[in-house]
Structures are given as C-alpha cells and as structure tokens.
Amino acid sequence: MSTFEESLKKLETIVDQLEKGDLPLEESLKLFEEGVVLSAACKQELEAAEGKVQMLVKQRDGSLKAEPFTTEKQG
C-alpha cells in the first residue's frame, strides 16, 4: 500500500501526462481511472487525518483542554 505522499505524487504525474494531451485514448482513459482511484484514496486519508487533529484551548482557569479541530467558521 502506498503512502499518502506517494499517492499524491503519482496523481500529480498522471495529471501532468493527461494535460499534455498527446496520449492515445485508451491510455488516457486508463490513467484517468487510476487518477480517480488515487484521488479518492488521498481524500479518504485526509479526512481520517482531519478527524485526529485536535487543538488545545486555554480555559478561563488557565488549564488546557483538547477540542476537535473544525474548519467551519464560528460566528
């Protein structure tokens, strides 16, 4: 199984190859399918990592409390 970094690098290579536009249709389709799989795997790994990230929040009494990190703006 590939690491996230390896998968991302392979995905970047596939995108570069497809952007050139000089591949036969069959090879382009094969690379596109591989890219979709790699993209989904990278997304899943990022979502799993996001769930593990926590931030330490300083409480009014000076103690620290771990809370889940969210990317949503809180108003």
Image: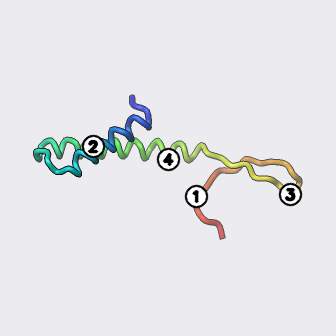
Q: What residue is pinned by disc 1?
A: 71
Q: Which mark is residue 6?
A: none
Element type at mark 3: loop
Q: Say which amino acid is labelled 3.
A: Arg
Quarter of the image for residue 9 reads top left
Q: What residue is pinned by disc 4?
A: 47
Give the crowd class for mark 1: few <14, some 14-19, many >=20 residues within 10 Å. few
Report the quarter where the C terminus lies.
bottom right
Which residue is found at the position 17% from the left and 46% from the top? 29
Q: Mark 3 and mark 2: span between their CA atoms?
A: 51 Å
Mark before the other along the chain sequence, 3 or 4: 4
Front tag of 2 and 1: 2
Element type at mark 1: loop
Residue 40 screen position, x and y as percent = 37, 45
Q: Is residue 60 above or below residue 42?
A: below
Q: What residue is pinned by disc 3?
A: 60
Q: What residue is pinned by disc 2?
A: 14
Mark before the other along the chain sequence, 3 or 2: 2
Which residue is found at the position 44% from the left and 44% from the top? 44
Front tag of 3 and 2: 2
